[in-house]
């Protein structure tokens, strides 16, 4: 069994898909906002913080921390604070490719194992009406980059290069490799 240091329903769904035995134990770690940071460094640091905060409370159980961001030309797009921010993010992503980067940290027996995964996502050019309509669904509001590839935004994405599950929020192949390195059975 592992502890998932995340409240993300998408991460829970992906772990369940793999048949992983886990419990959620939300981390109270303060996440870095990432302004001016390299996306890889940011997600790795935030994943480490989450895993270590929960591992201090439960040192005998493996703890998984994860953090995902969307970035475009070095600018990090977190979760939109309101509908206007969601529209701005979608306008910026429209017709362009961007990166989705997830950092993973697995705290096991006083050791910390880390890795990260990046996926390139290609967006179609969106009309103002498409952006307005999508934001009106509410789906973008708790998603990094203001979209959900596993939801309605799938229609905006002609292709990706890399891990689909990474774009959802937890790169399963990368997680499996990390667990093997840490000698944790999923």
Image (cartoon, helix red, strand yellow):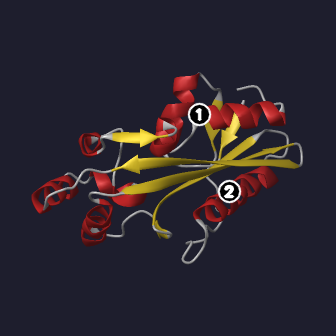
Quadrant for the N terminus, please.
Answer: top right
Dot 2: element: helix
Find residue 149 and report its horizontal and vertical position in percent.
Answer: 36, 43
Is residue 9 visible to us here? no
In the orientation shown, which residue stands out farthest toward the bottom?
36
Label 1 neighbour load within 10 Å: few <14, some 14-19, many 20+: some
Q: Is residue 186 left or right of residue 111?
A: left
Left/right placement of residue 63 relative to residue 182 reads left
Figure disc tally: 2
**Quick check: 150 left or right of 127?**
right
Q: Name the image quarter holding residue 19.
A: top right
The residue at 48%/55% (across/down) is 99
Numbered label attached to residue 172? 1
The residue indicated by pointer 2 is 50
Identified at 55% across, 41% down, the residue is 170
In this rendering, which labeled residue sits more in front, label 1 or label 2?
Answer: 1
Residue 179: where, in percent of width, then height?
75, 34
Mark 2 crowdedness (10 Å alpha carbons): few <14, some 14-19, many ≥20: many
Q: Residue furthest right?
A: 110
> Which tag, 1 or 2, sits closer to the chain's start?
2
Q: Which mark is residue 151?
A: none
How far is the residue under mark 1 from the one under mark 2? 18 Å
């Amino acid at each position: 069994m592992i502890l998932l240091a995340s409240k993300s329903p998408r991460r829970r769904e992906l772990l369940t898909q793999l048949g992983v035995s886990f419990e959620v134990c939300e981390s109270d770690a303060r996440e870095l906002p990432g302004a001016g940071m390299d996306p890889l460094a940011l997600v790795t640091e935030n994943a480490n913080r989450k895993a270590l905060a929960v591992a201090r409370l439960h040192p005998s159980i493996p703890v998984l921390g994860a953090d995902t961001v969307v970035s475009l030309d070095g600018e990090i797009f977190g979760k939109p604070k309101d509908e206007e921010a969601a529209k701005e993010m979608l306008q910026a992503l429209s017709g362009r490719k961007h990166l989705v980067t997830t950092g993973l940290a697995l705290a096991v027996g006083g050791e910390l194992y880390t890795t990260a995964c990046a996926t390139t996502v290609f967006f179609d050019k969106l009309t103002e009406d498409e952006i307005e309509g999508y934001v009106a669904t509410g789906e973008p509001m708790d998603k990094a980059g203001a979209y959900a590839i596993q939801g309605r935004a799938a229609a905006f994405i002609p292709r990706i290069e890399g891990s689909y599950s990474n774009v959802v929020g937890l790169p399963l192949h990368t997680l499996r490799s990390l667990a093997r390195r840490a000698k944790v059975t999923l």
